[in-house]
Amino acid sequence: MGREMNWRKSSRSGSNGTQCVEIARVPGSQRIAARDSKQPKGPHQVYEPSVWRAFITAIKTGRHDLS
């Protein structure tokens, strides 16, 4: 992963920026990386596209409702 990743926050992230997840495509692959926006130099996790899609689908259907 020598190339820089283009990190972005969700449009649903709050304006105070205290609890945000950022995602980026891993250069040269289809994988998705996720990190804590409060620690941009910290670690990140990498997911295969099918795993990421399953996670997003679960969120949208309320399986991970944290409210």
Image: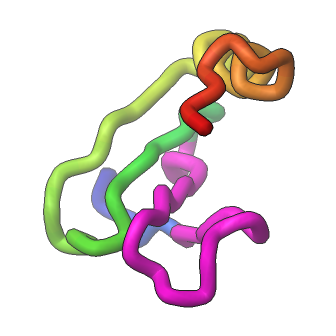
Horizontal arrangement in the rendering, residue 46 relative to residue 11 (left or right): left
User: Residue farthest to the left?
Assistant: 42
* Quadrant in the picture for residue 8: bottom right
- The residue at the point 50 percent across, 87 percent down is 16
Q: Is residue 52 magenta?
A: no
Residue 31 in the image: above or below residue 25 = above
- Residue 12, given in percent of the width and then of the height, sits at 74, 65
Q: Which residues are magenta?
A: 6-28
Residue 38 in the image: above or below residue 20 = below
* Number of residue marks: 0
Relative to the observer, which residue lies in front, 25 or 9? Answer: 9
Horizontal arrangement in the rendering, residue 19 relative to residue 59 (left or right): left
Horizontal arrangement in the rendering, residue 48 relative to residue 65 (left or right): left
- The residue at the point 68 percent across, 12 percent down is 63
Relative to the observer, which residue lies in front, 4 or 23? Answer: 23
- Residue 59, given in percent of the width and then of the height, sits at 71, 25
User: Residue farthest to the right?
Assistant: 61
- Residue 54, given in percent of the width and then of the height, sits at 70, 12
User: Residue farthest to the front?
Assistant: 67
- The residue at the point 28 percent across, 47 percent down is 44
Horizontal arrangement in the rendering, residue 19 relative to residue 60 (left or right): left
Q: Is residue 15 magenta?
A: yes
- Residue 33, given in percent of the width and then of the height, sits at 46, 44
Residue 52 in the image: above or below residue 28 = above
- The residue at the point 77 percent across, 70 percent down is 11
| Quadrant of the drawing holding the C terminus | top right
